[in-house]
Image (cartoon, coloured by chain):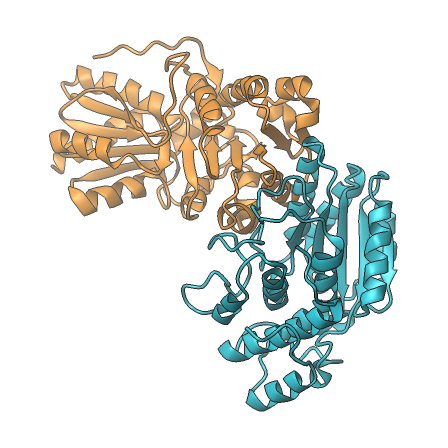
Chain colours: A orange, B cyan
Amino acid sequence: MIEYINQGSKDTRSGFGAGLTELGRTNPNVVALCADLIGSLKMDQFIEENPERFFQIGIAEANMIGIAAGLTIGGKIPFTGTFANFSTGRVYDQIRQSIAYSDKNVKICASHAGVTLGEDGATHQILEDIGLMKMLPGMTVINTCDYNQTKAATIAIADFEGPVYLRFGRPSVANFTPVDQKFEVGKGILLQEGSDVTIVATGHLVWEALEAAKILNDQGIKAEVINIHTIKPLDDEIILKSVAKTGCVVTAEEHNYLGGLGESVARVLSLNHPVPQEFIATQDTFGESGTPAQLMEKYGLNKDAIVSATQKVIKRK
Amino acid sequence: MQTQYSLEQIVSQVRRDILRMVHKVNSGHPGGSLGCTEFLVCLYNEVMDLKEGFDMDGINEDVFFLSNGHISPVFYSVLAHRGYFPVEELNTFRLINSRLQGHPTTHEGLPGIRMASGSLGQGLSVALGAAQAKKLNKDSHLVYTLLGDGELQEGQNWEAIMYAAGKKVDNIIATIDLNEKQIDGPTDVVMPMGDLSAKFISFGWDVLTVEDGNDLSQITAALKEAKSKTGKGKPICILLKTEMGNGVDFMMNTHAWHGKAPNDEQLESALAQNPETLGDY
């Protein structure tokens, strides 16, 4: 087994902030917008270095989405920053008409996604955003797993033409992917080779999947672990190649099972290579207050849940 | 290249186009289109500084955003006669496989359209973004936008109105089509909006009111005055008092023609009131 080392836990949103700072230094067309959450989105450094390229919109997300769409006319590459809930559900029609249908090159960058936002509770813990965004024609949907990958993805999407939804989170999590990785939109990453089960994970669940694979290995189960950072367009090939070998799948995400990664994977499998699948996801529920670890456990989103799901799915083969 | 026709001649032809377009497909929005015909003809043929070639990159030229996208017939006709696309294409309005969708969109690549509109309340925000991009690009050209008055009931507008003044976006001229009518009746009955001039002024805008928004000379004068007020730290609003259905007697003084096409007889009567000038498509 490949041993993945946590280089020191960090929050993925800080990876976004670091990526944005680098873009500020390297790409003069990148502009940033925020709706009164600069500190939470870690945009301070970009703003300090590029005050003329930053637009504070105030608590007015609909207006922010429209202004971002307009900024593209004239060649700017706008990055909007607010919480995932306010980045998607609150402004769905603005994104649909002014960005997606209008083919605008806007990067919607969303922090505090999922239950790991923690104590603020369900009003802020969106678990439906991946579904909302992936249903929009032409929208690319990315959910990164750690600090390094979020930084790399932030930098990469500036050169990727078209609207992108980049989803990341609030808590400090293991930082284990390479520092200077090349981020390829739409390309899954094979993290661990195995022959008994394919674990397809996204976002914060990728590290949990690697931890689960270690436990499973001790039980004599060889798990293949794939990091799907891009949920749309989905890397069908890497998934199909893996299930051809393992014959079953566990998908893992910090999102409702309705509309999430699991459903996208299920579609690929049913069209090409039907195999048993188990879904690690929230079960059509809102979240609640608590610490991120408590919530991940209560909503069945941690390594232990992945281990149980794997044992179950293997029996169904 | 500026057209050799007078604004009056273009207005008459655009009205004919609107009527024939909506009649052919028995759908579309003639009332608001006719009410804004003089304004858009004047804006595109007399006021805006446009690059010839219509490359649509939006740099070093004035740009316009139609927020109340349902008046697409007038927008399409004005754009076609200005040279953005062949006039004959008006014949495809609302038909399948057409670039002239029911509501304007960039999606089919129709030159002249810079954003999709139809879901109301979004145009002013997009126009503000374009205005900010112009400032970043040190492009001294202006951004124009047109909104319906009923559309101001959408809350996003007031986010944008606050932003524009608060952030001193002074390279934008937003015109409100003040016809005082919306689908369900007079705006004062459906949702009274009070004194719009006072509202814009209190938000920090410079406001001009055009008493007859269907009078070409009043429109031209107002747009020129509005241009002279740009670059002074305040966004500019023109309250354009228009008559819905203007130029067709039976479509005026009512909201009945907001989204209704004329029948054969009504079309004949309407066309008789608006002579063919540039040639029907």
Q: In this picture, is B179 found above or below A262?
A: below
On the image, which quarter does residue A241 sit in? top left
On the image, which quarter does residue B148 sit in? bottom right
Regarding residue B152, the answer to whether it shows in the image is no
Q: In the image, what residue occupies the spot 87% across and 50% down?
A: B201
Q: Is residue A209 left or right of residue A55?
A: left
Q: Is residue B220 left or right of residue A45?
A: right
Percent across and percent down for residue B281 are 54, 73
Percent across and percent down for residue A169 are 49, 27
Q: Is residue B135 left or right of residue A187?
A: right
Q: Farthest residue in the bottom direction?
A: B265
Percent across and percent down for residue A16 are 52, 23
Percent across and percent down for residue B153 are 71, 59
Task: State the quadrant of the N terminus of chain B.
Answer: bottom right
Q: In the image, what residue occupies the spot 41% across and 26% down?
A: A144
Q: Nearer the viewer, residue B226 or A234?
A: B226
Regarding residue A184, the answer to whether it shows in the image is yes
Q: In this picture, is B204 found above or below B35?
A: above
Q: Nearer the viewer, residue A154 or B213?
A: B213
Q: In this picture, is A171 found above or below B223?
A: above
Q: Nearer the viewer, residue B231 or A117?
A: B231
Give the mark count: 0
